[in-house]
Amino acid sequence: QGPGRELQIDQKEYVSPIYSLLPRLISEWHDSSNTELALKCLHAAFMKRKEYSTVRVAAFTKQLSTVAMHAPPFTAAPLLAFMRQLLHRYPSAAQLLENEQDVVTQGTYSPDA
């Protein structure tokens, strides 16, 4: 689609800061513009390109659900909607919603993975 249309960057260096900043959306003082910006970043990371690490997708799904449980409604609803889109795009991560014998990954997310 032409030179300069997309930057070729290491995906890990883009998604690791997003992952670590998601819990900050829980704060009451954040407004919906911060949520919108976070969702744009997540969309660029997972919807505009294919993520090949199921562990990373599973970690983000878990992080999004955790943040949504504690966030104000104007943040929780869009995060849950994005998580639904994420699970549709990466069906293997949907096993997180199944019983414990069908879990995709174990342990904690490592940004270096």
Image: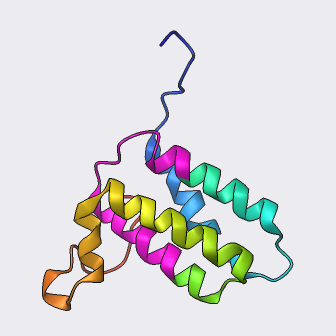
Asked whether 54 falls inside the magenta stretch, the response is: yes
Q: Please give the range of residues in magenta.
A: 43-65
Figure quadrant of residue 36: bottom right
Q: Quadrant of residue 23?
A: bottom right
Colour pattern: rainbow
Which one is in front, 112 or 49?
49
The residue sitting at 80% across, 60% down in the picture is: 33
Q: Residue at x 79, y 66 (%)?
A: 32
The residue depicted at 42 percent of the width and 77 percent of the height is 62
Name the residue at the top extreme: 2
Residue 75 locus on image (x, y percent): 69, 74
Task: Give above or below for 7 relative to 112.
Answer: above
Looking at the rendering, which quadrant does residue 96 occupy?
Answer: bottom left
Residue 98 appearing in the image: yes
Residue in view at x 41 percent, y 39 percent: 49
Q: Is residue 113 visible?
A: no
Residue 28 is inside the magenta segment: no
In the picture, which quadrant includes the C terminus? bottom left
Q: Nearer the viewer, residue 72 or 103?
A: 72
Is 93 positioned to the left or the right of 5 in the image?
left
- The answer to whether 99 is drawn above or below residue 34 in the figure is below
Residue 61 in the image: state x and y as whole percent: 42, 70
Magenta stretch mostly in which secondary structure?
helix
Q: Position of residue 110 (x, y in %)?
A: 39, 67
